[in-house]
Image (cartoon, grey):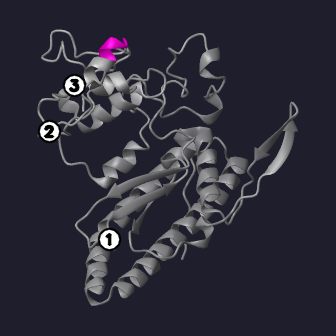
């Protein structure tokens, strides 16, 4: 939390010198000047790093304004001017909204990088840049879903029996051009493509042994990662069609969860093992369909890049 009252034992517990330690050692940050907390130590800001100006300032600003726009929170670049640790969203956030936040690229804002192509990115290193004021620098105005993401999770904690627990929407690689798939807590099997061990090849670079993971067609991660890598070569022509396809795909999955959930709970009341078997079958089939389509899309995009690189990519129909 931002501000604590250690005398209020019903709501706060903390070391007796929690506030004094920050003040006495010179790293205490206080509430905004002129506000009700002007003379109170902001514990979250003092002990944490809530306003990382390079990596997280824009991310936090975007999330707050997507989910609580009524608060009108502005971008904060001053380390002493911090964002609130918690805010109440204007409406209940759906899993689909959260999924799309991981794809957000500041569309409709002065920091819009939705058309930035992979070749335009500057990975020269933060310290080497003389100026970070260009919006065409993904390394500075970093979206939540950066290309370094390996997995993304949206977790729903529902009122299920403990053996089921909840539902996890699991996404491999960068969410921008990947898909969130539903998994229930009682699954006992995993798609074999999600278990593939990747053996990299090695090269010597400046006397150091450097690993280079190779694309493997039986690796779920590499299927989605490589599809996204190629789609980012031109987000407008290639990436947007891929992203739109997966967003529509997720809407269909979301719409069917009510039926899946009802059947899962019905079977659980009869026999938890039957419910686990049902969750396994559903998850494996759902994952397999998505993997096959991602592979199909990847191959189609490779052919498109060779035959019509200046044209818009058309996502192939999903097979069986």
Q: Quadrant of residue 254?
A: bottom left
Report which residue position mark 3 lands on.
72
80 relative to 223 in the view: left or right: left
x, y (%) of residue 315? 54, 57
Stretch in magenta: 22-26
Quadrant showing the C terminus? bottom right
- Residue, x 33% and y 18% (percent of image)? 22
Look at the picture and state if 266 lies above or below 137.
below
Look at the picture and state if 155 lies above or below 104.
below
Quadrant showing the N terminus? top left
The residue nearer to you, when weighing 271 against 316, is 271
- Residue, x 43% and y 28% (percent of image)? 56
Q: Which mark is residue 53?
A: none
Report which residue position mark 2 lands on.
11
Look at the picture and state if 168 lies above or below 146.
below
x, y (%) of residue 170? 45, 59
- Residue, x 57% and y 46% (percent of image)? 238
Q: Which mark is residue 256?
A: 1
């Amino acid at each position: 939390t931002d501000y604590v009252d250690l005398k209020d034992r019903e709501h706060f517990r903390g070391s007796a010198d929690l506030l004094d330690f920050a003040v006495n050692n010179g790293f205490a940050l206080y509430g905004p000047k002129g506000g009700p907390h002007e003379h109170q130590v902001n514990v979250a800001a003092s002990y944490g790093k809530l306003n990382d100006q390079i990596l997280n300032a824009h991310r936090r600003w975007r999330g707050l304004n997507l989910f609580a726009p009524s608060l009108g929170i502005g971008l904060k670049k001053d380390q002493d001017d911090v964002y609130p640790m918690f805010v109440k969203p204007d409406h209940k956030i759906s899993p689909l909204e959260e999924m799309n936040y991981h794809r957000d690229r500041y569309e409709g804002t002065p920091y819009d990088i939705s058309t930035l192509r992979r070749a335009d990115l500057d990975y020269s290193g933060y310290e080497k840049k003389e100026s970070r004021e260009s919006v065409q620098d993904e390394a500075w105005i970093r979206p939540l879903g950066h290309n370094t993401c390996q997995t993304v999770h949206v977790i729903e904690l529902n009122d299920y029996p403990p053996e089921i627990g909840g539902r996890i929407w699991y996404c491999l690689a960068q969410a921008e051009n990947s898909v969130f798939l539903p998994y229930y807590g009682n699954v006992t099997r995993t798609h074999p493509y999600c278990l593939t061990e990747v053996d990299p090849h090695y090269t010597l670079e400046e006397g150091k042994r450097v690993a280079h993971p190779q694309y493997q067609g039986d690796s779920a991660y590499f299927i989605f990662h490589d599809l996204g890598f190629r789609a980012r070569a031109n987000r407008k022509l290639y990436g947007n069609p891929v992203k739109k396809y997966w967003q529509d795909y997720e809407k269909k999955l979301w719409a069917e969860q009510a039926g899946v959930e009802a059947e899962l709970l019905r079977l659980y009341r009869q026999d938890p093992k039957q419910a686990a078997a049902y969750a396994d079958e559903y998850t494996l089939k759902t994952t397999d369909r998505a993997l096959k389509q991602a592979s199909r899309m990847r191959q189609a995009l490779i052919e498109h890049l060779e035959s019509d690189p200046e044209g818009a990519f058309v996502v192939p129909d999903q097979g069986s």
